Image (cartoon, helix red, strand yellow):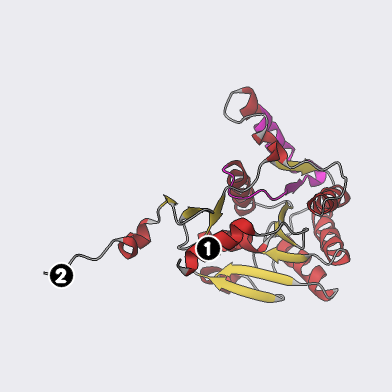
């Protein structure tokens, strides 16, 4: 059994843990409304109060910087994950920082290091992260809570889009609930608290969307989706194809 197989087997057999690390998606700009910055600060304080580590995209700009500084200045744990191409634009690095070669590896590490995901207002990058994380839940790559903070109705158009997709047959009713849209930081943390308690076997009102569990894990080369039961390549990464081809027999 090779190291990759052992790693996958250990993932499959891992005991569920309460939520101790949350990945926060949000804008690298602060936005025009002070309520956005206030929500980022409130979320940071809530993480510190629960001894939950912040995982985020690195740097000190915008809402990303606000939530990271709030956690760090209050003695909380901060992990930033940033592609090398963005280092020149990220500003000051806060807490621990991991640099990665590309955006895909960044998101792979987000998933590996976080027990849940919370999305604050943001731009195209934030929306892309939210939708990919939700899609991974749809594909059973993870079974972690995905929460969306609808500050000042910022994400109401997304909720409307999802409802429209359900009505037109593009999203199932169960999958429409994979990302839970909430109105405030206390509402988001109530879901996190209930999810942690449910993992510990306590009676709560929390039910994982569609009762799903993670059937797959990201491991090995970035871009290759593996089943937890073994090294079964479901999606191959073309850039590494030459490394997976058996050598030609010598003449």
**In the figure, 217 relative to 62: above or below?**
above
Outermost residue to the front: 1
| 26 sits left or right of 233 in the view | right
Which quarter of the rendering shows the C terminus? bottom left
Residue situated furthest left in the rendering: 251
Q: Which residue is mark 1?
A: 105
For marks 1 and 2, give the one nearer the viewer. Answer: 2
Q: Would you say residue 140 sits in the magenta stretch?
A: yes
| Near-viewer residue (111 or 204) | 204
Q: How many marks?
A: 2
Task: Name the quadrant containing residue 113.
Answer: bottom right
- Which tag, 1 or 2, sits closer to the chain's start? 1
Task: Report the residue at 54% width, 65% height from top.
Answer: 7
Q: Residue at x 76, y 72 (%)?
A: 77
Q: Secondary structure at mark 2?
A: loop
Q: Position of residue 211 (x, y in %)?
A: 70, 39
Left or right of 142 in this view: 69: right
């Amino acid at each position: 059994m090779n190291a990759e197989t052992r790693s996958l087997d250990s993932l499959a057999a891992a005991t569920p843990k309460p939520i101790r690390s949350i990945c926060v998606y949000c804008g690298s700009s602060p936005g025009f409304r002070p309520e956005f910055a206030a929500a980022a600060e409130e979320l940071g304080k809530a993480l510190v109060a629960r001894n939950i580590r912040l995982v985020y995209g690195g740097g000190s700009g915008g809402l990303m910087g606000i939530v990271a500084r709030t956690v760090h200045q209050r003695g909380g744990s901060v992990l930033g994950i940033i592609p090398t191409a963005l280092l020149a634009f990220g500003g000051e690095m806060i807490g621990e920082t991991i640099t990665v070669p590309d955006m895909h590896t960044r998101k792979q590490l987000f998933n590996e290091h976080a027990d849940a995901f919370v999305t604050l207002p943001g731009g195209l990058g934030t929306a892309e992260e939210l939708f990919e994380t939700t899609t991974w839940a749809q594909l059973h790559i993870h079974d972690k809570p995905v929460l969306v903070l609808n500050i000042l109705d910022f994400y109401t158009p997304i909720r409307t889009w999802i409802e429209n997709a359900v009505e037109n047959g593009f999203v199932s009713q169960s999958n429409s609930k994979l990302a839970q849209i909430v109105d405030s930081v206390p509402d988001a943390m109530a879901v996190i608290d209930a999810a942690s308690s449910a993992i510990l076997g306590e009676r709560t009102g929390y039910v994982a969307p569609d009762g799903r569990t993670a059937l797959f894990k990201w491991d090995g080369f970035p871009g290759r989706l593996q089943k937890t039961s073994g090294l079964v390549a479901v999606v191959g990464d073309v850039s590494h194809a030459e490394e997976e081809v058996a050598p030609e027999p010598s003449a």
